[in-house]
Image (tube, rainbow, N blue to C red):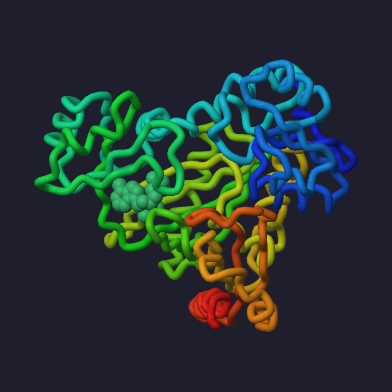
């Protein structure tokens, strides 16, 4: 087997997708002397604002994708709703990490669940649903409550519906007609946690401390690191993430979202083969941020130290914070131990991720209180 290719500083990294994850990767890459090109259908994007080159073209424009790939040394993606075909076109001209195969599994909820299930990884009970009849059969098998989710192109709770006893199944199915879907058992979890794992081209792995995540309306709201869980549970969660990365034969970064049960059991909710919102704290609070780690992994470099420098908390800033006008940035910047991140998005729509705050503390709980107080200060008159 030939040695995996290594891309040293000075190389050009291509990023498919151009949101805030690519933006923070670009910051990490440029800091280390890499060039960054980004490709998405849009212009003046969060990533494009930081990149050497921004290409605005459709993902199904084969000529544009090939041209883009010829101009970079190694290509990665910052969200998983990129057609596999696009990545395959690119792979004819440059190294692509993670592989199109990893993208294929992780961009489709049913494929991802079947992969995990076949790998013997515990996850909530699920069944494929393609019709109202399938839904009735799945409800009979899995019981209620349950969550119906689209198989593809879902994120942040979009394309999801909880089904409770007594709900009309035909009505529940109506918005899903024409899509593939998955019915999943509703999990009464103790906590939601996530683990970031990076795997290098040589098979080496590192994991980050476990994150504790609180969602609001299906969107991540607060992340606390390290999670307030038993050390043996944290070890188990980290080992599980490594196991999944190895079984996927991943080269790159993977976020593993998990449900922690009252008995200490762990069920896998979702995989994302890229940096993750729950890892944003690492930009300020870790020896190696998740973005630098993604860069190291896809470039074939040694992986970095994942230790946290201080307990930290991250809160998201959604467009809703702008409802009463421009937030009071000065109030937040006056606070010690709080860092402000904004993604350069012009339009603050409700539910749109516009930025985040990271706060530090002597304990995770203190960091969490500071982060929430900082966010509240943004809109206090
Ligand atoms: P997802 O996009 O699948 O990660 O779902 C977004 C959020 O919805 C999760 O982080 C949970 O808070 C909640 N959720 C999703 N699936 C389930 C489930 N099967 N049981 C309980 N809560 C769920």
The quadrant in which residue 69 appears is: top right
Left or right side of 183 for 281: right
Foreground residue, 129 or 192?
Answer: 129
Which residue is rendered at x = 83% and y = 27% of the image?
A: 71
The quadrant in which residue 192 appears is: bottom left
**Quadrant in which the C terminus appears:** bottom right
Picture coordinates of residue 67, whole percent (x, y): 79, 21
Picture coordinates of residue 338, whole percent (x, y): 65, 76
Residue 304 visible from this viewpoint: yes
Left or right side of 126 for 317: right
Residue found at the very far front of the displayed protein: 325
Residue 203 visible from this viewpoint: no
Picture coordinates of residue 356, whole percent (x, y): 60, 63
**Quadrant in which the N terminus appears:** top right
Which residue is rendered at x = 59% and y = 25% of the image?
A: 100
Foreground residue, 322 or 65?
Answer: 322
Which residue is rendered at x = 53% and y = 44% of the image?
A: 242
Foreground residue, 55 or 243?
Answer: 55
The quadrant in which residue 58 appears is: top right
Above or below, 221 relative to 132 = below
Picture coordinates of residue 56, whole percent (x, y): 72, 32
Above or below, 133 relative to 145 = above
């Amino acid at each position: 087997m030939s040695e995996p290719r290594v891309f040293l500083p000075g190389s050009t990294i291509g990023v498919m997708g151009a949101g805030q994850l690519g933006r923070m990767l670009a910051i990490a890459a440029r800091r280390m002397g890499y060039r960054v090109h980004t490709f998405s259908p849009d212009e003046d994007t969060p990533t494009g604002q930081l990149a050497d080159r921004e290409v605005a073209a459709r993902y199904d424009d084969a000529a544009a994708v090939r041209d883009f790939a010829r101009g970079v040394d190694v290509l990665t993606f910052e969200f998983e709703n990129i057609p596999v075909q696009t990545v395959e076109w690119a792979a004819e001209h440059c190294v692509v990490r993670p592989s199109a195969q990893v993208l294929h599994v992780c961009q489709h909820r049913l494929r991802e669940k079947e992969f995990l299930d076949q790998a013997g990884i515990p996850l909530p009970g699920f069944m494929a649903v393609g019709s109202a009849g399938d839904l009735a059969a799945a409800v009979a098998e899995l019981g209620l409550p349950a969550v119906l989710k689209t198989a593809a192109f879902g994120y942040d709770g979009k394309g999801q519906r909880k089904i409770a006893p007594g709900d009309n199944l035909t009505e529940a199915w109506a918005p899903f007609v024409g899509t593939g879907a998955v019915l999943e058992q509703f999990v009464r979890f103790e906590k939601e946690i996530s683990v970031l794992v990076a795997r290098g081209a040589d098979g080496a792995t590192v994991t980050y401390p476990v994150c504790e995540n609180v969602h609001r309306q299906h969107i991540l709201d607060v992340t606390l690191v390290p999670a307030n869980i038993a050390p043996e549970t944290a070890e188990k969660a980290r080992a599980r993430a490594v196991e999944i990365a190895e079984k996927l034969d991943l080269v790159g970064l993977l976020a593993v979202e998990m449900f922690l049960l009252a008995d200490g059991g762990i069920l896998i909710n979702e995989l994302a083969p890229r940096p993750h919102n729950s890892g944003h704290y690492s930009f300020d609070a870790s020896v190696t941020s998740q973005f630098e780690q993604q860069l190291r992994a896809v470039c074939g470099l040694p992986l970095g130290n994942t230790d946290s420098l201080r307990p930290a908390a991250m809160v998201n800033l959604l467009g809703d914070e702008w409802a009463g006008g421009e937030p009071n940035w000065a109030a937040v910047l006056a606070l010690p131990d709080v860092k402000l991140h904004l993604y350069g998005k012009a339009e603050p729509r409700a539910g749109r991720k516009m930025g985040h705050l990271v706060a530090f503390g002597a304990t995770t709980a203190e960091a969490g209180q500071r982060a929430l107080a900082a966010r509240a200060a943004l809109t206090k008159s």
